Image (cartoon, rainbow, N blue to C red):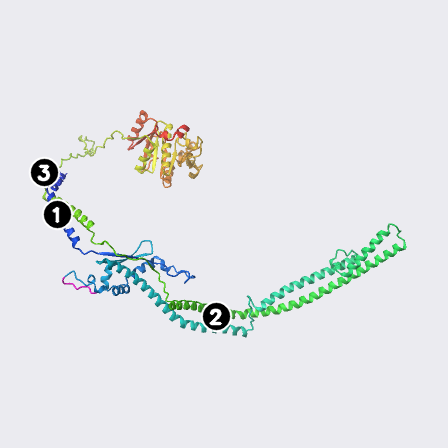
Amino acid sequence: MRQVSQHEQDVDVDMGALFGALWRNWLKILIAVLACTALAVFAVILLPKSYMGEARVIVETGESVFTRPNQSDRSALDTEAVESQVALVTSTEVLANVVERLDLAGREEFQPSSLLPFSEPDNDILSRVSEHVTVYRVANSRVIVIEFKSEDPDLAAAGANAVADEYIAVQARAKADSNASATAWLSPEIDELQKRVREAEAAVAAYRAEKDIPSVRTDGTLASQQLGDLSAELSRVRAEASDAAAQARSVREALSRGEGLDGLPAVLDSPAVQNLQERRAELASDIAELSARLLDNHPRMRGLRSQLSQLDQQIRTEARRAANALASEAETARLREQELSDRISSLKAESARVDEEEVGLRALEREASAQRDLLESYLARYRAAQSRDAGDYQPVDARIFSRATVPTSPVFPKPVPIVAATFVGSLLLAIVAVLIAELMSGRALRPTVLAAPHPVVQQASRPRNGGDAPDLAPSHADIAPIAPEPEVAVATTADAMVAVLAKTGASRVVFVSPEGDGAAIVGLAIARALADAGIRAILFDLTENAAATRPSLDGETAIGIMDVLADKATLSQVVRGDCYSDLSIVPFGLTEPAEAIDQIDRLPDILDALEDVFDMVLVEAGSTDAAGLAQLRSQNAEIVVSVIEAADAMVDSHVRELHEAGYRNLTIATCAELTKSRSKSAEVA
């Protein structure tokens, strides 16, 4: 074992010596800081001033509803298009036009210069001008900012405006060139398309004449239209024939049975029958009138009855004539039906032939229609491009909405920031230099002598032959530290307890009530305070008389965790809501604990599963001991002792028992103040 020598020493930094060194060298520090600050002021005075002009351009569609109402091109407004416009602003063409417009090549500011004596100067005027131009896009917008730096404030403003103007001009020229190219390309294409359209339409007409396919204005062929008309006519003729035959049959059946003909429309519609019916009615009226004064064998009565019989015979004769007429009409309709059927058969054959021939006709018509649509599209584009060239109208996809004004203050150098930064930087550097020099000299270091540690003595093992081993005193490392007195925090308000739990970040809190289930109201009050604070919390009640959850249910009993362990209910069925807060609760249940004791090992898994759903799981364990508490704890659990009176001897004994079992940092929650904020719960309890 290595022994520590008395001559081995360590060193420590003497902070007093460091501050003393700063105090001794304050004059040197002040002189260095003032010298650096003076150099900064001198540099600010001598450095040439730079001014910046700023112009702003917005990228938007230049077309209006009057120039192009049927098109809505949004491709120029997306993010990639705006970034492309930023690159276009600093293109060679734009910068070259700006150089020529402002005669930048003749200005001393843009003359080639070399920083090193042996290096070649840069003769590219465009690269030097690009160093003075800054173009960027405003975030989340279609606005492009153009900045131009120059030693001349007028040139700074003119340069920014010139870059913006040339950018718009380049876009307009590009549009004009595009329109000219489109016009030159479309003209021969239109001539060729017109020729092809004429050929396609001529092919359609020739094919129609060759195959004898008549042209109709509506959809379908002529044969199909005639076929439809004849089918309708055939249906009508068939209906008339059936109606006439039915009426003739009804009249003949009535005559054969000797029935009256008053209910037959075909007989009553005859004018002759109507006249006979009127005469018969008059004759029947006379017979009825004379029958009151004359006997039946009176000659006049017998004459009138004879006339009545003759009229009935005439009516039957007219009815037979009407039946014969209806039969003739039915026969005529059948002949017409046969004729129509023959014509329909011939038209069906003709329609089938035309349909077969129209396959080729439709192909030719599709080709002609496609060529015609393409020609119309090209003609519309050609006329639009031609009208733009003639009217010199070239809308661009950008607009200058803010032109640069002559700046009044330079952007570089900024006297105040430069001088202030130099002063602070030089002061810090001077202080660091003094401290490093003091440490390197060793004047700020002091020796520290390490105390010799206690010797480590190992416990000798007992010989196997049973001899006594020498008694050796154990070292400090081998002695387990004696547990000190329990250090217990006391929370007397709900807000204080919520703050303690929020600080610890615990996901599970186990309440122990040494005084009995009556103190469970403390855990309920804390749980409600957590719910009121916006924490999703759930309270498990493991007290047999449901002291923790009965007030939440207004004194009712309900299924709970014991029913879940006994497989009489699911966990989703036993989760209830507190009647007075947003707290979720799980009652003790209606099942006897003896029935659920075999499944008690499932309780830790249930608690772990609920920790994934709720922010905090609270368990009211009643007056459980340290052994029962072990089944409810987790790595991120807090133990809270809920009591009525914190100074109770029973509480002190229970806290010591938990402390001796290895539970540290216990918190006692008293009921005195907590129940004031939950007076309604206290009354129910």
| Magenta-colored span | 117-123
Q: Mark 3 points at which residue?
A: 7
Q: Is residue 665 visible?
A: yes
Which numbered disc flags the more N-terminal residue, 3 or 1? 3
Magenta-span inclusion, residue 122: yes
Q: What is the three-letter code of the residue carrying label 1?
A: Ala
Q: Mark 2 points at which residue?
A: 368
Tell me which secondary structure the magenta stretch mostly adopts. Answer: loop
Residue depth check, mark 2 versus mark 3: number of the one nearer the observer: 2
Query: Count of labels shown?
Result: 3
Q: Mark 1 points at which residue?
A: 32
Which element is circle 3 on? loop
Q: Which quarter shows the C terminus?
A: top left
Q: What is the three-letter code of the residue carrying label 3?
A: His
The vertical placement of 508 against 387, above or below, is above
Q: Position of residue 495 (x, y in %)?
A: 33, 33
Tell whether 3 sits left or right of 593: left
Residue placed most toward the observer, 341 or 414: 414
Q: What is the three-letter code of the residue carrying label 2?
A: Ala
* Residue at image coords 17%, 48%: 425
